[in-house]
Amino acid sequence: MFPLLIQRLAAVTDVEEPGAEHGDLLVDGIALGVCGTDREILAGDYGTAPAGHERLVLGHESLGLVKEAAETAPRNTAAFAQRVKDLTARIDEITPRVAATAAAQERVLADLAVGELEAQKQRLASYATQARFALASLYDEAAAGGTQ
Ligand SMILES: [Zn+2]
């Protein structure tokens, strides 16, 4: 038995405009992102065309302007606008704290690096002293007739 490898064919085609009755919103597309899910669908990992359709349309990460909205679409976006406004204020509030934390983290990392370099410098000084003693010992042995 051989494994069955299915590589789906992708195509850029025009599709019939569905109209708002098939969903809550009809959107004029402006930009479209292709994400990992789209790549997995193309690789055949999952995803099938909806019932009655030949193709699965990719592009769930998109940006556009709403042309039509079904009655079920939310009409009052004031709560959402207020939430965005509140988040903007919160972001403005924490931005200086984030910058201060980043600066503090940078100081801690700099202190750690300086400490490590100081320790390495001391180890190198110790090795230099040991090397001087070893060299002096070699001179002493040579002066005493050496054993070579
Ligand atoms: Zn996605």
Image: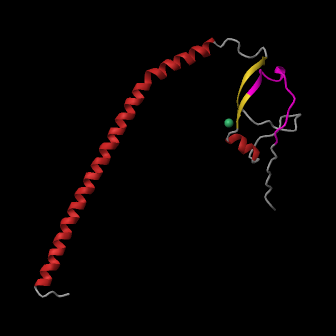
The image quarter containing residue 14 is: top right
Q: Residue at x 15, y 77 (%)?
A: 137
- Nearer to me, 47 or 32: 32
Instruction: Tell me the residue at 60%/15% (across/down).
Output: 81
Q: Where on the picture, by quarter, is residue 65? A: top right
Q: Position of residue 89 (x, y in %)?
A: 49, 18
Q: Is residue 55 above or below residue 21?
A: below
In depth, the one of 20 and 126 nearer the eye is 126
State whether residue 144 is above or below residue 103.
below
Position of the N terminus, as image quadrant, is bottom right
Screen quadrant of the C terminus: bottom left
Q: Residue furthest left?
A: 144
Residue 22 is a magenta residue: yes
Residue at 71% across / 45% down in the picture? Answer: 40
Q: Is residue 9 above or below residue 66?
A: below
Residue 81 magenta: no
In the displayed structure image, the side of residue 34 where residue 5 appears, left or right: right
Location of residue 4 in the rendering, given as x and y in whole percent from the top left corner:
80, 56
Taking the spot 75% from the left edge, 48% from the top edge, the residue there is 43
According to the image, what is the colour scheme of the structure?
A: secondary structure
- Whether residue 24 sits left or right of residue 142 in the image: it is right
Q: Which residues are magenta?
A: 11-29
Horizontal and vertical percent position of residue 70: 79, 16
Q: Position of residue 122 (x, y in %)?
A: 22, 57
Q: Where is residue 33, by image quadrant?
A: top right
Total number of numbered discs in the rendering: 0
